[in-house]
Image (cartoon, grey):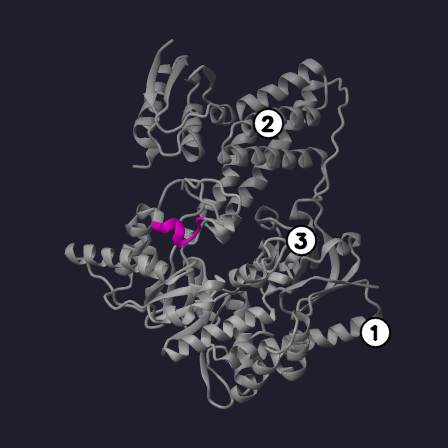
């Protein structure tokens, strides 16, 4: 299962608008997508689960995807996170 | 027939049937079901209906309050379509064969308590969102629309314990004749909304209104602060007469609102507006405002996740100041802390936030917060009449400290070759009793004062203005507060400085003759109050106002002062 490791640089972490943008991006793909922060792994398409991760600014997250469009999904999420959730 | 007293929050007389805005607890029972597929189909339809309501709430809020406030409804919509939530509900319905209401309530409560358990204010607020959207969906499942305002389909008076912005967002305002609430003070959401809409309101009426039944006949007397439940025919006739008189006065007031506020013996004062953002420009100008006496800068800082940049602030301040041309616009520097919290500014919790690090106390500690705002203001004031004022000044040192930061900003801007307002007037709010007492010293170091009666009253009377039980103490018709106002005006005039007043009191019709008589130079109020203030000032003499003020300051209570003004200045009676 392909995975990538990223750092959340946004001021508010994976909360508020960044969290919404993250979940909405994940939801565009058919693959199953998981996001891990510290010891918690949750469904990346679930806003409620992503919020409970408590990923703050500077947190490392691991994203895994499985399915036909897994590579595209990881690429899109990587761009979103590295682009500071489109707020630059 | 029964009369309940509360706080008069918005002028006028409303007569009509009661619309009881219920926040009743939804009672959800767990029932066995036999057809899980049909149950899940109901869930799907309820989610669709809820989604449509949230879309509507988004659009209305965006129009009335801006995109930032509206986004909460999009977030709620995502929560309701969350695959984990929907999946868990589906599993429970299928495996336990229980009704979807019960499965949804229990599942969403698990998510809500998980978020609540994390010590984070933002996540706690999201827990409320899950509960809110769940309750909305449950109402759709049950066909119970008591709470949603959508069932208001005929003109009525809204009766509620209290109303939040999300309660009022879906109310069809054209059907709202008046408001009466059990809780809240004159600055509560309902009060502000009612004044904005020009609809009569009585707030803080207490338990007495809880017995009002749907469709009871009601009168809301927004002048006296009374709610009459099931009035008899004679009373109704009397109120209809007063309503007619009010509407006549309202029409007279609107007819003269673009004329100067000048007494019959030739004393002129300024009547200006309090506004909160760009959306306030048009209503203020339409109401005949001669400028802006209080531009709250908080609007740029709330409902977002990061600090607004200097550039963003500059553009916003400039567009407002330019819209008023040569008329003055007074920008108040950031006034947060107390009851106004900004989540992305790290403020340590305080036992007594109203007595803690708020307003300039916070800004002086945080140059990264303060300097961009001051730079933006200095730049925005180039070529118009923008003035700057600082809230929560307690001493002369406070003024010297803020002026030194302001001077640094001026020097930096000059070195950068930026256009800036070199001669910008700088004033302070008088809202701490010490500042009123030291007004003679403070008048030496500033260009003007603006009295903030909401805070001045609460600090003078030691009465929390957000606490309905002491709301009358903090309401501002206190002899002690009037005496402080007199001290401030006298001290400023001796030094040749002018004094404005931008608290709620400036727009209170009963206070205007006293403030005028004390020599107040500028009255800054919410735009809907401007026509009434101008009409009153134009119908009385300064000589009479001086006598009235002198007598009022010797009276011993809030009630005595109100009663005296109503007798001595019959023009204050609007109905």
- Whole-percent x, y for residue B276 in the image: 45, 58
Which subunit holds the residue at mark 3?
B
What residue is rendered at 39% in x and 14% in y? A64
Q: Which mark is residue B234?
A: 1
Q: Are marks 3 and 1 on the same chain?
A: yes
In this view of the protein, can residue B289 be seen by the observer?
Answer: no
Q: Residue B113 has which mark? A: 2
- Residue B434 lies, in percent from the top left, at 46, 63
Circles 2 and 3 in contact, beta carbons < 8 Å = no
Marks 2 and 3: same chain? Answer: yes
Mark 3 lies on residue: B183
Task: Return the x and y of residue A4 as percentages of the image width and height.
Answer: 33, 16
- State which chain disc 2 sits on: B
Residue stretch in magenta: B357-364
- Residue B147, by quadrant, is top right
- Regarding mark 1 in the picture, which secondary structure is present there? helix
Q: Under tag 2, what secondary structure?
A: helix
Q: CA distance from mark 2 to mark 1?
A: 55 Å
Q: Are marks 3 and 1 in contact (CB under 8 Å)?
A: no
Q: What residue lies at 58% left-to-right and 74% top-to-bottom?
A: B511
Task: Please state if B387 lies on the left or on the right of B478 as rendered.
Answer: left
Chain letter of the residue carrying label 1: B
Principal SS element in the magenta part? helix
In the rendered image, residue B291 lying in the magenta stretch gets the answer no
Mark 1: give few (<14), some (14-19) or many (20+) Cα within 10 Å.
few
Alpha-carbon span between mark 3 and mark 1: 30 Å
> Disc 2 or 1, which lies upstream in sequence?
2
């Amino acid at each position: 299962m392909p995975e990538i490791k990223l750092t959340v640089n946004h001021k508010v972490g994976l909360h508020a608008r960044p969290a919404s943008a993250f979940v909405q991006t994940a939801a565009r793909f058919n693959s199953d997508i998981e996001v891990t922060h510290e010891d918690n792994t949750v469904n990346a398409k679930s806003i409620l689960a992503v919020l409970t991760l408590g990923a703050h600014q500077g947190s490392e997250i691991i994203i895994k995807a499985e399915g036909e469009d897994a590579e595209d999904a990881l690429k899109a999420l990587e761009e979103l996170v590295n682009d500071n959730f489109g707020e630059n | 027939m029964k009369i309940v007293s509360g706080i008069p929050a918005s002028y006028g007389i409303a007569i009509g049937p009661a619309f009881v805005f219920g926040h009743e607890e939804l009672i959800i029972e767990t029932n066995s079901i036999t057809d899980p597929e049909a149950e899940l189909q109901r869930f799907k339809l309820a989610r669709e209906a809820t989604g449509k309501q949230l879309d509507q709430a988004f659009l209305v809020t965006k129009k009335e309050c801006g995109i930032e406030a509206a986004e909460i409804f999009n977030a709620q919509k995502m929560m309701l379509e969350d695959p984990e939530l929907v999946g868990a509900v589906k599993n429970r319905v299928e495996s336990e064969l229980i009704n979807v209401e019960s499965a949804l309530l229990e599942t969403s409560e698990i998510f809500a308590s998980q978020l609540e358990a994390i010590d984070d204010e933002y996540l706690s607020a999201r827990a409320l969102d899950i509960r809110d959207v769940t309750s909305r969906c449950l109402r759709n499942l049950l066909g119970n629309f008591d709470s949603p305002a959508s069932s208001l389909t005929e003109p009525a008076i809204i009766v509620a314990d209290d109303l939040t912005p999300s309660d009022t967002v879906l109310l069809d305002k054209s059907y709202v004749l008046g408001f009466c609430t059990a809780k809240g003070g004159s600055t509560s959401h309902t009060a502000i909304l009612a004044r904005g809409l020009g609809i009569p309101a009585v707030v803080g009426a207490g338990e007495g209104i809880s017995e009002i039944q749907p469709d009871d006949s009601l009168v809301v007397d927004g002048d006296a602060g009374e709610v009459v439940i099931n009035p008899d025919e004679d009373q109704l006739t009397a109120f209809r007469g007063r309503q007619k008189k009010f509407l006549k006065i309202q029409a007279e007031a609107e007819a003269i609102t673009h004329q100067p506020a000048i007494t019959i013996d030739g004393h002129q004062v300024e009547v200006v507006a309090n506004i909160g953002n760009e959306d306030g420009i048009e209503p203020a100008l339409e109401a005949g405002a001669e400028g802006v006496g209080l531009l709250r800068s908080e609007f740029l800082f709330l409902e977002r996740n990061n600090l607004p940049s200097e550039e963003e602030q500059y553009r916003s301040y400039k567009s407002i100041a330019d819209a008023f041309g040569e008329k003055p616009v007074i920008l108040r520097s950031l006034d947060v802390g107390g009851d106004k919290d900004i989540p992305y500014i790290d403020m340590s919790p305080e036992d007594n936030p109203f007595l803690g690090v708020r307003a300039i106390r916070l800004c002086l500690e945080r140059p990264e917060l303060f300097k961009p705002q001051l730079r933006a203001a200095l730049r925005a004031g180039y070529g118009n009449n923008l003035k700057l004022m600082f809230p929560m000044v307690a001493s002369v040192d406070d003024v010297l400290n803020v002026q030194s930061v302001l001077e640094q900003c001026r020097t930096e801007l000059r070195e950068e070759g930026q256009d800036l307002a070199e001669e910008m007037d700088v004033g302070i709010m008088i809202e701490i009793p010490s500042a009123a007492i030291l007004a003679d010293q403070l008048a030496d170091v500033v260009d003007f004062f603006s009295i903030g009666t909401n805070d001045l009253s609460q600090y003078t009377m030691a009465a929390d203005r957000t606490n309905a039980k002491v709301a009358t103490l903090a309401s501002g018709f206190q002899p002690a507060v009037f005496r402080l106002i007199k001290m401030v005006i006298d001290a400023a005039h001796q030094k040749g400085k002018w004094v404005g007043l931008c608290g709620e009191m400036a727009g209170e019709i009963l206070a205007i003759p006293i403030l005028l008589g004390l020599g107040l130079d500028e009255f800054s109020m919410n735009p809907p109050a401007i026509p009434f203030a101008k009409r009153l000032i134009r119908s009385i003499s300064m000589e009479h106002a001086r006598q009235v003020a002198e007598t009022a300051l010797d009276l011993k209570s809030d009630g005595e002062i109100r009663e005296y003004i109503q007798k001595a200045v019959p023009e204050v009676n609007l109905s």
